[in-house]
């Protein structure tokens, strides 16, 4: 941008199309400033989106780890013929964990709906 401005000043100083060059340089400079501001805003929005995606990915991975843990736990108990009555504390703990994970899923579903309402279909599909 500075090179264009320098060339414009040189042309004006040399008396070559002074008024036209000044207008063109002013127009180009104004457009450059608008585009630069738009690019900065877009970069900030993308950074925010990347952070949101990272948080969502972390929550999803934690949920998947928990599901794998519960699957292993329940499979082990079934294979050993344990019933909920034989392990009441574990059963209560699992009920609490299921309630917590249901809340996480509900929050994630709400986030998906918010993305869809905002027209961010790609983010919602993740």
Image (cartoon, rainbow, N blue to C red):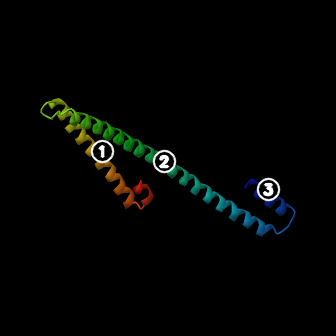
Tag 1: Cα neighbours inside 10 Å, few (<14), some, or many (≥20)?
A: some
Q: Does residue 57 appear left or right of residue 17 in this picture?
A: left
At x 54%, y 54%, the residue is: 42
**Mark 1 vs mark 2, CA separation in Å:** 20 Å
Mark 3 or mark 2, earlier in chain: 3
Q: Nearer the viewer, residue 26 or 91?
A: 91
Q: Which residue is mark 2?
A: 50
Residue 46 on image: x %, y %: 51, 51
Q: Does residue 126 appear left or right of residue 95 in this picture?
A: right
Q: Are marks 1 and 2 in contact (CB under 8 Å)?
A: no
Tell me if I can see residue 120 in this picture. Answer: no
Per the image, label 1 sits on a secondary structure element best described as helix
Q: Does residue 125 appear left or right of residue 94 in this picture?
A: right
Residue 20 on image: x %, y %: 77, 69
Q: Which residue is mark 1?
A: 104
Tag 2: Cα neighbours inside 10 Å, few (<14), some, or many (≥20)?
A: few
Q: Nearer the viewer, residue 25 or 110?
A: 110
Per the image, label 2 sits on a secondary structure element best described as helix
Tag 3: Cα neighbours inside 10 Å, few (<14), some, or many (≥20)?
A: few
Mark 1 or mark 3, earlier in chain: 3
At x 21%, y 32%, the residue is: 80
Q: Which residue is mark 3?
A: 6
Q: Nearer the viewer, mark 1 or mark 3?
A: 1
**Mark 3 vs mark 2, CA separation in Å:** 39 Å
Per the image, label 3 sits on a secondary structure element best described as helix
Q: Nearer the viewer, residue 115 or 93?
A: 93
Tell me if I can see residue 33 in this picture. Answer: yes
Mark 1 or mark 2, earlier in chain: 2
């Amino acid at each position: 941008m500075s090179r264009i401005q320098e060339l414009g000043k040189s042309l004006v100083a040399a008396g070559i199309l002074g008024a036209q060059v000044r207008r063109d340089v002013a127009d180009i400079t104004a457009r450059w400033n608008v585009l630069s501001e738009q690019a900065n805003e877009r970069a900030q929005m993308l950074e925010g989106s990347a952070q949101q995606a990272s948080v969502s990915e972390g929550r999803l991975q934690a949920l998947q780890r928990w599901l794998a843990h519960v699957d292993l736990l329940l499979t082990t108990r079934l294979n050993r013929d344990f019933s909920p009555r034989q392990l009441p504390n574990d059963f209560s703990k699992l009920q609490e964990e299921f309630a917590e994970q249901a809340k996480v899923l509900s929050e994630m579903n709400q986030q998906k709906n918010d993305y869809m309402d905002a027209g961010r279909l790609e983010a919602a599909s993740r």
